[in-house]
Structure formats: structure tokens, C-alpha cells
Image (cartoon, rainbow, N blue to C red):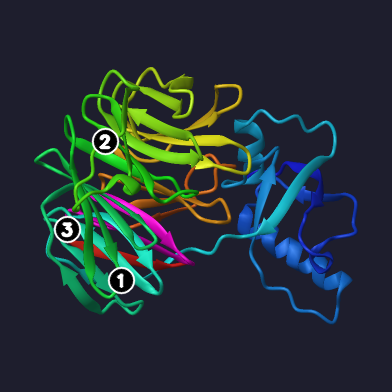
Amino acid sequence: MNNSEYIVKFVTSLPQEYQISNNEIAVQGDMNQSDLSSLIQQLLSAENTDQEYNQLFDFFINGISLRSTLHEFITSNEIATEKTLQIEYLFAVPEPKLKQTINMNDWIIAIGKLNNQILTCLSNGDIVVCSEKGKILKTYKTKMAKSFTIFDNLIISTHWDCTVRIQRLTDNLELIAQGSLPSYGECSCINKKNTNEFCVGTSNGELIFFDLNTVKQQVIEMIQNFKVHQQQITCCQWIRNSTILTGSYDHSICIFNKRTETINKQLFAKDSAIIGLCYLENNQQIVSIHEDGYLKLWDSLSEQLIKIYKSSLSQLTCIAVNANGQIIVSSMDGNTYLWDLRGEVPLYQLNGEGKALACTWIDNKILFGGSTNKLYVYNC
């Protein structure tokens, strides 16, 4: 037990009824998140006797989440304590609970949403529609696929015969067009500002661009192609009207401008391949996931690496972010990890089996699945 004592000031951006007027208070060094939550509840109740407080809180010091005792945190982060220590508190992220598992008939490689339904794309080409309660409503048979991208009711798939297909799901699954690729298509993304435009990242490092306005008799041909990487493009995201973010086995991230036909910026991970990417619009940061189990946070403006996080001992496979900036990452160890990047470690590990290959947020639910043919649904 540690008997250290620290003078702290609690601050928050929460509504007025969750703010403490006390400027400074002495706390014990052996207090952890749960202990500090109880303390905040007591202080709030003392100031607002007509209200009951039972919320749990997360605590941050210098922008880093507290996940140990206060003394351990201060020691490991070499924080000076000669002056009053400022601790920010916010509502805690509740631990996700497993709601259900839904059995599919092959490996799950993409998950999405259509209205109030769940779309699950399988490696055998099946597109499975489920109700919110997990009942399988419809299974559409298509070609065996390497990758799927889901955006609203549009589904792009790449296939082992070096083709790409664009389909629309309404009451039925409609083939809009099919086209050829110069090499295997490994990933794809849609321009959300103009959904007629999409591109495919290939195994030889090219970005291949298509426009649905050019479709003739369900055939589409590429309108442009650019060599962006030296090796396979593993992931891509259309982040602005003419800007595409890409990651590759060549250990680099590129920000490619379609209008100027140039690579605006290139970030180098050096020691590991990029498997997935996520662009954070609010602060123009990039989160990359890697084959060695690490996440990396980048500043896209300065092109600098901000921070490195260890998520898993296995390769990471998929990343998704929700409207609150919370990030989930799936792993070849079968699990999915919930992150707040202000912390040093994941908030929670969501247990699965086999290899988790796909993950997504749907409202306040986390969904993931992979090689066990099971779709895991967790409530947050």
C-alpha cells in the first residue's frame, strides 16, 4: 500500500450539476479510478443534497487516461507534483456486454448497416441481411470475394479473378456494373460527396478510379490509374472530394490528390506494414493499425508520428471509429479492443474466437467477426 498524498484540483467540461466548486483537495496515492469516482460522487452529493450521483467517471492527467493507482500513474509518467495536480473527469465509458452471436456460413470479412438491418459480407461472396434482433432475413449469393466495402445501400466487392463488382441493395440485390482490374483488388472506397466515384487499391500498389456515369450494359472501365505504393495497398479511405488516404505493405501511408494526380504527403511507419487506417476529421489525425499489433497516431498536417500504442500480440485486422471518437480494433487473436487514445492501454477487451477480421459500430453496438463464422454483437 502506498501512503503518498497529493494535492489535486478536479476539473470537467460536464454540465454544471457535475462540476465541483472545491479548488483543491488532498487525495491518497493508492486511489484508483473506482476510488476517485466514489470521491467525486461524495463531493457532488455534498454540494447538491437534493440529487443522487452514482455515475462512474474516467480521469485524465495531462490528457492521459488513469488506469492504475494515482501514485503508479504519476511515477510511470514522471509527472511533477510540486504544484497542484489537475485531474480532468468525464463520464466513464461503460463496459460493453455481449448481447448475442449470429452464426453465418463462412468467414466474415465486412460488416455494415442498411436502415435498421445488419449487412454481413462473407468470403464465399454471400451477403447476409439480419434484423436488429439477429434473425437472418435474406442471403444473397454472389462471387467468392477478396474484399467488400459497404456504403449505404451500395456494395463494392473485389474478386479472385481480378474483377470488381458494384451492387445496390434495396428490396433485392441489383448488379450495377462489373469491371476488370490489372491485378488483384485488395480494398476499395467510395467518394461520399459523389457516390458515383469509387476507387480500388490493388496488389501492385495502384489506385484504380471508376465512375458509375460511364457504365454501359453493366460494364464499367477504369478512368484513371496511379502508382501510389511500391507494394500492395491494404486499405484506403476517401477523406475529401479529391483526396484518398492509403496504407500499404511497403510500410507507408499516402495522402493522394486525384485532382492534381500527385501524392501530397507520405508518412513512413518504417518497422511494420499498415493493415488499416482511420481518418479523424475533427483534428485531421490518422490512426493506423499494423501487422505487429500496434496502433499509431499521426498528425496529417505536420506528417509527424504522435504516439504508439500496443493493442495485441497478434496482427491487427480492422479499425472503426464512432461519432464520439471511440475506436475499436479487431485482431487475429480473435478479440476486438475498445480504445480511448488518451489512454495508454485499451479500455476494454471484447472476447471472440478464431481470427477477428472485420469490425464496425452500429449506433451504440460493436459488431465483429471472422474465421469462426460468428458475428459478435456487443452493447455499449
- Neighbours of disc 1 within 10 Å: few (<14), some (14-19), many (20+): few
Which of the pair 25/140 is nearer the observer? Answer: 140
Q: Nearer the viewer, mark 1 or mark 3?
A: 1
Q: Which residues are magenta?
A: 352-372
**Mark 2 or mark 3, earlier in chain:** 2
Q: Position of residue 107 (x, y in %)?
A: 16, 55
Secondary structure under badge 1?
loop
Vertical order, 100 against 80 (above or below):
below
Identify the amino acid type marked 2. Answer: Met
Report whether 73 appears left or right of 244: right
Identify the amino acid type marked 3. Answer: Thr
Residue displayed at 73% across by 74% down: 53
Q: Position of residue 52 (x, y in %)?
A: 75, 78
Which of the pair 131/61 is nearer the observer? Answer: 131
> Is most of the magenta stretch helix, strand or loop?
strand
Task: Work out whether residue 351 can be spotted.
Answer: yes
Q: Position of residue 39 (x, y in %)?
A: 74, 62
Q: Nearer the viewer, mark 2 or mark 3?
A: 2
Report whether 112 appears left or right of 278: left
- Cα distance in 3D space between marks 2 and 1: 26 Å
**Mark 1 or mark 3, earlier in chain:** 1
Identify the amino acid type marked 1. Answer: Thr
Q: Residue under label 3, please give it.
A: 372
Q: Residue under label 2, please give it.
A: 222
Task: Work out whether residue 334 can be spotted.
Answer: no
Which of the pair 317/206 is nearer the observer? Answer: 206
Q: Quadrant of residue 169?
A: bottom left
Secondary structure under badge 3?
loop
